[in-house]
Image (spheres, helix red, strand yellow):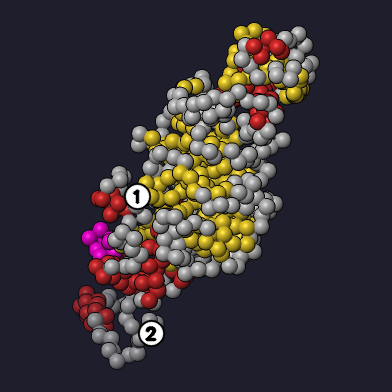
Amino acid sequence: MRTITPVVILSTAMLLAACSSTKLDDKAPVEDRTGSSSVDPRSVGTVNASNDPLNDPQGVLAKRSVYFDLDSYVVKPEYQQVVANHAKYLQNNRTRKIIIQGNTDDRGGAEYNLALGQKRAEAVRKSLSLLGIPESQMEAVSLGKEKPKALGSDEAAWTENRRADIVY
Amino acid sequence: MIKTSFLRSFAILALFVTSLAHAQLRVEIAGVGANQIPVAIATFGDESLAPHQVSAIIKADLLRSGYFKVIDTGSVLTENSAVNLADWKSRGADALVVGSVQRLPDGRFDVKYRLFDTNKGTQLSSLALANQPQFIRVSAHKIADDIYEKLTGIRGVFATRVAYVTKSGKEFRLEIADSDGEGTQVALRSNEPIISPAWSPDGTKVAYVSFENKKPVVYIQDLVSRKRTVAANFKGSNSAPSWAPDGNRLAVALSRDGLTQVYVVNADGTNPRRLSNSNGIDTEPQFSADGQSIYFTSDRSGGPQIYKMSSNGGEARRVTFSGGYNISPRISPDGKFLAYISRREGKFQLFTLDLNNGQEQRLSDTVKDESPSFSPNGKYLMYATESGRRGTLAVVSVDGQVKQRLTTQAGDIREPTWGPFMK
């Protein structure tokens, strides 16, 4: 029997090597499992809730108080923007609810002042209602003279306390 | 009725401080009545057996009322002692009070007393009251009430209680005390304000407005069980509770329809019915004692005034016409007088109005009066005021002569309400 010469082995190896480098046919159909897009289903996108404008201390929604003149229960023009800003936010965030707390200065009886504070809260609520905010998102209440923000019985304190606050 | 010995002086400003050892409420007498009946009061037999000295409580009560001059007998006289009434009359006493205290086998104390008329030389009254040791003060107050009634013809209020709100630092408390300021108990502690407490007609519950829910809500609290129920928590503000005499309904001020108006609601919070109808603020409803009418504050005419309507609602008739700001109506138990707070020249002061003849009377000289409350016998008004920048309570007799001031050691005291007669 004749031995297989190294030349034969080598040429066989070369032939095999040549086979393995044969290119695949580009036109062969590839099964597409992802539908029309090519997004990876295991990718994760980031939502930034710290971007809620409500929490921005520099944002317009940080202003939540409407101040009133003595014996007055209408929202002054200079506070219409505050109301509008919150109306816009509430429209874009339908699940958010607010309580509007009206206050008075410390002069007068507790119960009558509770009712006067209510008028202030109601004025803000009405303004929001006219901008399309439904009843279900708001409640107007009063703290009367019971929770003054500014203590003391002088003009500065009285002015600060004649106020309605929007509370989320 | 006993003949009173006449004093020519008017209201004497006798600043007489009675600082009672464990009282958290201190009572100062600042004015007495024009007529003071001199009564001799003996030390009661064995009274040091009991936790409190009965004769001392009786003396303090009668003195505080402003209608009595107390003569100390300087000795013990019991209901069995021989008494020489003519002798007492010559010592200037129109009446003599004697008695004793006995401990019963079951641990209760039996307090006996007699009241004598020295002019007629006869016995006017006697009582025997057996009570647990913790109620010895009530027994003493009941005897003082009996003396007061027999000698003035008017039912006494010494055995009644008062409720009020204190504020100290950040804490608000609803407290109950005896009418002499003793025995204070805390019914509610809160970090949020409490206003407008109102006693139920039977004296076992107090309705009040609490801000603990970030809005005013009316609660009813059973003082014994501490159970609380919500009487009104409708959308908006709920306040100004006033009990109907039957104890089953309350008149309240609700803003649920937008404006603050007067409603009636069942004590369990069901079935609110609107009673008032105006384009302004209607609030502070108060049932009359017969339950037929409701007095309330309304600013429908521009400024707040007091009106009266049927307790079924309907047309309201205006009652106050002096001044542009009249609030906090309170109707006397006999329906004859209206007490209220009026703002005159920037001062908020206590006034009464005689509903028969329209006569008005100013009862205070202070400038920040609030929340008046009639005693159940209609003779006195308790109200909140300011003294030296602190909230204090004051008592004044309806004729303006008897005056008392009640202060706490620290903090403010406000929103007083006088409790009813109880058994």
- Read off the magenta span: A55-64
> Can you see residue B269?
no
Q: Amino acid at mark 2?
A: Gly
Q: Nearer the viewer, residue A5 or B344?
A: B344
For label 1, the SS is loop
Image quadrant occupied by the N terminus of chain B: top right
Query: Mark on residue B345?
Result: 1
Quarter holding the C terminus of chain B is top right
Residue furthest out toward the bottom: A27
Q: Quadrant of residue B48?
A: top right
Which chain letter matches label 2?
A
Q: Are marks 1 and 2 in contact (CB under 8 Å)?
A: no
Q: Residue at x 31, y 59 (%)?
A: A70
Q: Residue at x 63, y 62 (%)?
A: B310
Foreground of the two, B210 or B183: B183
Residue B382 percent across, percent down from the top left: 52, 39
